[in-house]
Image (cartoon, rainbow, N blue to C red):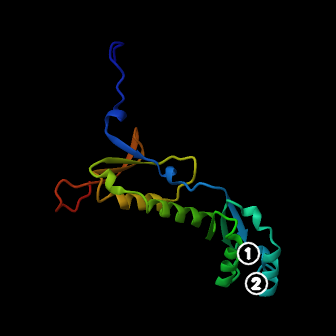
Amino acid sequence: MSEDSPLVNRVAQSGLITLNLEDFYPAGDVAVFDLKDYLFMELILKEKDFREALKGHDWQQYSGKILLVHCSTDAIIPVWAYMLVATYAAPYAADIFQGNKDTYYQAAFLRALQRFDPQAYAGQRIVIKGCSHHPVPPAAYVELTRLLQPYAISIMYGEPCSTVPIYKKPKDKTSPLQG
């Protein structure tokens, strides 16, 4: 390449639209309420003791936070125990979720993607960004692909400069081949 030749940004000229699932990452601090700490021998929930412990618990520590309620042991927890925790936490927590961090983030991404408008990307070539600073569950990538497929011309994974082809709309709609 000669010194007179201008640098050309082929990625910018490609017409690719990059979607970053990290943009759907739930905002807010996460706190965990582990029922294990309220079980007799970490196995048995005694209703009377549990109710007394919840009354004395400092619920204000969850103010404005996303509270994840789960049990980290293999104990059988009655459903009403989760419900009771939710009633105490509701005046303080910004959100309450039954499950661990992995299940919460998966559900939060799927909930956020329900508000995503895939029709806005009709006829576009899409790259779903692969790298992020926050963990994005695989279920979010699957859901975004499912939402975009009826509208996008193509879907790729990775970075615009290095993509993995995922889907290409067939030119002949009768063809079963997807690219």
Question: Which residue was labeled with disc 2?
Answer: 45
Viewer-side residue, 92 vs 33: 92
Residue 159 vs 155, above or below: the answer is above
Of the residues shown, which amino acid type is indicated by label 2? Leu
Viewer-side residue, 148 vs 5: 148
Q: In which quarter of the image is the N terminus?
A: top left
Residue 136: percent from the left, percent from the top? 53, 55
Of the residues shown, which amino acid type is indicated by label 1? Leu
Element type at mark 2: loop
In-image side of 123 versus 118 (left or right): left
- Residue closest to the far front: 91
The picture quadrant where one finds residue 87 is: bottom right
The picture quadrant where one finds residue 80 is: bottom right
Question: Which residue was labeled with disc 1?
Answer: 35
Residue 106: percent from the left, percent from the top? 53, 63
Residue at left 26%, top 57%?
A: 178
The picture quadrant where one finds residue 8 is: top left
Give me the disc on residue 115: none
Residue 167 vs 91, above or below: the answer is above
> Given contact means CB atoms under 8 Å apart, are the residues at marks 1 and 2 in contact?
yes
